Amino acid sequence: MGRLGRPKGLKGDVYLSMFNPSSDILLDINRVGVGEDEASLKVYDVCRAVMQSQKWVVSFKGLTTRESCAELTNQLLYVDRSDLPKLPEGQYYYFELLGFSVVDESGHAIGRLKNIIPTASNDVYVVEGDQEFYLPNIPDVVLSISETEQSILVRLPEVIDAL
């Protein structure tokens, strides 16, 4: 869901960089997991989550000092899938797509989806294969997504196709 940053102030608040900066889903979440990976999660109750100066600030039950929340710096924030609202058909949470194979129109596997970068106009898919490249998530490039096959069918832009 995001990565925790440095503490804010002296009372246990901490900055949060959301992977999807336009999401306000945190306002509806009461419990989160925090850790370097899913295997090392500690569960915390969310006391407060507010947007301040275009940054999320969160506080957790039991963490009331700057020192107590400093250990959370750079840790990942996870939520239980059942706490997320169901999305309309054809829409996906970023984490659902990461690791999907990326295939061109001829059926050639060109890599795996490594990351998604949100931008003002459209998301950008970071694909890792023989080399890393970026694909805009626009209808002319991303043709379809198959959850059952865990694949993304793309039409490569000419500049990438020539590589």
Image (cartoon, helix red, strand yellow):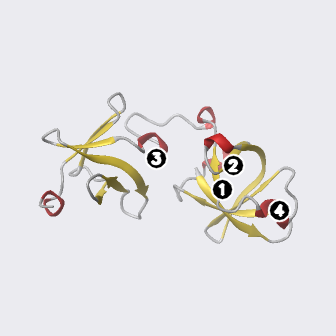
Q: CA distance from mark 3 to mark 4?
A: 29 Å
- The numbered dot on residue 75 is 1
Viewer-side residue, 156 vs 162: 162
Q: Earlier in the sequence, mark 1 or mark 4?
A: 4
Q: Earlier in the sequence, mark 3 or mark 4?
A: 4
Q: Residue at image x 29%, y 52%? A: 129
Viewer-side residue, 51 vs 72: 72
Instruction: Name the secondary structure under disc 1.
Output: loop
Q: Residue at image x 41%, y 40%? A: 91
- The numbered dot on residue 94 is 3
Q: Residue at image x 40%, y 33%? A: 89
**Is 111 left, or right, of 65 in this rendering?**
left
Residue to which mark 4 is pinned: 12
Residue to which mark 2 is pinned: 34
Q: Residue at image x 26%, y 54%? A: 130
Check contact, mark 1 vs mark 2: CB within 8 A.
Answer: yes
